Amino acid sequence: MIAGAYARADGPLVETIVLNTNGMFDQTVTYSDGQSFKVSDRWTNRYHQVKFTRLYITRDVEASKVLSPPELLYYVNFVWEEGVLAHTPEQGYLLRRK
């Protein structure tokens, strides 16, 4: 089952995404300096491709650095496999089931 809570820590931030069974999600990004960003919207799953209507992206994988502030993007895709949501698995942008 894909619905559930996923999290990752990356240097100065903690990111949590809760996928609800009703197709809605909540994302919270909290930085060690106290900044916090939240978004709630819709998610869908098709063949383990999880698509978010809007989502904060917290890592620039090409530059290998944390984004502060995060970037709010539309129609973001992740891959789900065995309790892991992966945006760019080969570069370590992973959220694991809590």
Image (cartoon, grey):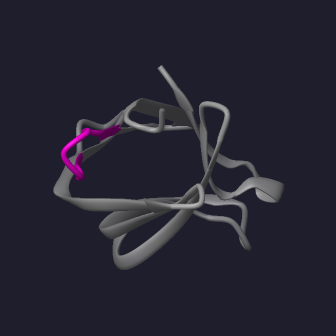
Residue placed farthest to the bottom in the image?
74
Whether residue 69 is visible here, answered yes or no, is no
Measuring 47% from the left and 32% from the top, which residue is drawn there?
Answer: 7
Q: Is residue 62 above or below residue 67?
A: below
Determine which quarter of the picture holds residue 66. Answer: bottom right
List the single residue furthest toward the right. Answer: 90
Q: Residue at x 73, y 73 (%)?
A: 62
Left or right, 79 with reference to 75: right
Q: Which residues are magenta?
A: 18-25
Can residue 50 be seen in the rendering of this structure? yes
Residue 83, how many percent across, how many down? 60, 31
x 67%, y 33%: residue: 82
Q: Can you say whether 81 is above or below 71 in the image?
A: above
| Place of residue 3 in the rendered image (x, y in percent of width and height, measured from the top left) | 38, 36
Depth check, front residue: 2 or 61: 2
Q: Is residue 80 left or right of residue 77?
A: right
Examine the structure image and report whether residue 91 is included in the region drawn in magenta. no
In the image shown, does 1 or 34 lie closer to the viewer? 1
The residue at 48%/32% (across/down) is 1
Check the image and report above or below for 73 versus 59.
below
Position of residue 47 relative to residue 31, above or below, is below
Tell me: 54 left or right of 45: left
Q: Give the side of residue 68 with respect to residue 62, left or right.
A: left
Q: In the orientation shown, which residue stands out farthest toward the front?
A: 47
x, y percent for residue 34: 24, 36
